[in-house]
Image: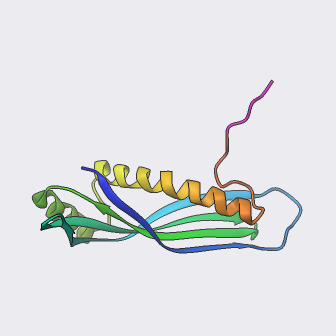
Amino acid sequence: MPVISFNFTKISAERSEARPGSTNIKNSVVMNDVVKTSLKLGPQNQDVLRVLFEFTSTYEPDRGKIKLFGEVLYLEKPEKLDTLVKAWQKDKKLPKDEARSIVNHLLSKCNVEAILLSRELNLPSPIELPRLTK
């Protein structure tokens, strides 16, 4: 089933003083919480999975950090939602297929936002962009 909504709830970006040498960039996505919530879709309420996340790009050694917080709403059959919530409550993990779908959606949105923020702060892009070579 699809991701039906994506929202940033907090954006934090900072650059430290420029230092000579190379910069290592580490990106990470963490699902902080997964809950079942009710959403009004048309004339009726629909249960959806609400996934709270945090995306971080860290520039080392101590050159800067971009942090994006947000939520994703994931639509699934009611019985499947209960299974997903129970899996999260047990291990703080979602099954691989659902986790892959959600994380891929997060990465597509967060990487673009992180690239834009890195440009504004004069930091290197958090992901390597394609280049032409000879």
Task: Provide residue 100's location: percent of width, then percent of height.
Answer: 37, 49
Q: Is residue 37 above or below residue 94?
A: below
Q: Range of the magenta residues?
A: 130-134
Task: Provide residue 53's location: percent of width, then percent of height.
Answer: 43, 68
Magenta stretch: residue 6 in it?
A: no
Q: Is residue 97 above or below residue 28?
A: above
* Residue at image location 23% in from the left, 57% down from the top: 75
Using the image as rendered, state which of residue 119 and residue 62 is in the foreground.
Answer: 119
Q: Is residue 63 left or right of residue 30?
A: right
* Residue at image location 68% in from the left, 37% down from the top: 130
Q: Quadrant of residue 62?
A: bottom right
Using the image as rendered, state which of residue 98 and residue 75 is in the foreground.
Answer: 75
Task: Provide residue 124's location: percent of width, then percent of height.
Answer: 74, 56
Tell me the chief SS of the magenta region: loop
Q: Is residue 10 left or right of residue 18?
A: left
Q: Quadrant of residue 73?
A: bottom left
Q: Is residue 102 above or below residue 16?
A: above
* Residue at image location 81% in from the left, 56% down from the top: 22
Q: Is residue 123 left or right of residue 127?
A: right
Using the image as rendered, state which of residue 84 and residue 36 is in the foreground.
Answer: 36
Instruction: Find the residue positioned furthest to the front.
Output: 43
* Residue at image location 15% in from the left, 57% down from the top: 80
Quadrant assignment for the C terminus:
top right
Using the image as rendered, state which of residue 35 and residue 39 is in the foreground.
Answer: 39
Instruction: Find the residue positioned furthest to the top.
Output: 134
